[in-house]
């Protein structure tokens, strides 16, 4: 009887933990139905220098995280970044969040971190525009 009671309490605790998000989970939640982001602005003479789709299926009781680095480690840095457009392909509020963690607009490199919501997937299109330095 004690084992059944402990199991019931444990099960209820797990269900509550999954239904009510912790502050850490809430801090990673984006606002709104779509979580698009733009940084900088297009400038005369700039061009699309990198386009990548980041897509990943959900993970049970976890987050999905992926990073995009431009340029790739073995490539030269030829452009100054003028504009970054990140499009969340989930439009129902279940998409992830994207943030710049290194470099970005005004730099010749960028590292973008993407993170899904809890037990959700990712689907972003990342476009990076740049201009050759004078």
Image (tube, grey):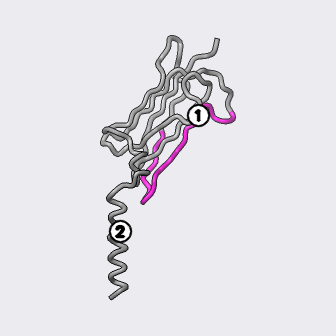
Q: Is residue 58 above or below residue 87?
A: below
Q: Residues within 10 Å of mark 2 (few under 14, many from 20)?
A: few
Seen at 44% across and 38% down, the residue is 124
Q: For the magenta stretch, what is the residue range?
A: 54-74
What residue is pinned by disc 1? 102
Q: Give residue 13's position: percent from left, percent from top.
A: 35, 68
**Quarter of the figure that contains the C terminus:** top right
What residue is pinned by disc 2? 13
Find the distance from the CA under tag 1 to the CA under tag 2: 39 Å
Closer-to-camera residue (52/16): 16
Q: Is residue 104 above or below residue 131?
A: below
Q: Is residue 71 magenta?
A: yes
Q: Give residue 24's position: percent from left, percent from top.
A: 44, 51
Q: Is residue 12 magenta?
A: no
SS for callout 1:
strand
Q: Give residue 77's position: percent from left, percent from top.
A: 66, 25
């Amino acid at each position: 009887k004690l084992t059944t009671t402990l199991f019931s309490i444990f099960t209820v605790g797990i269900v509550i933990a999954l239904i009510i998000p912790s502050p850490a989970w809430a801090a990673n939640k984006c606002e709104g139905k779509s979580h698009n982001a733009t940084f900088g602005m297009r400038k005369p003479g700039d061009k699309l220098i990198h386009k990548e789709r980041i897509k990943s299926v959900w993970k049970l009781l976890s987050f999905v995280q992926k990073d995009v680095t431009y340029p790739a480690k073995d490539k030269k840095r030829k452009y100054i970044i003028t504009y970054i457009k990140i499009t969340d392909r989930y439009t129902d509020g279940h998409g992830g969040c994207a943030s710049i963690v290194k470099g970005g607009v005004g730099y010749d490199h960028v590292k973008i971190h993407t993170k899904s919501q809890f037990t959700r997937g990712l689907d972003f299109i990342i476009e990076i525009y740049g201009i050759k330095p004078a």
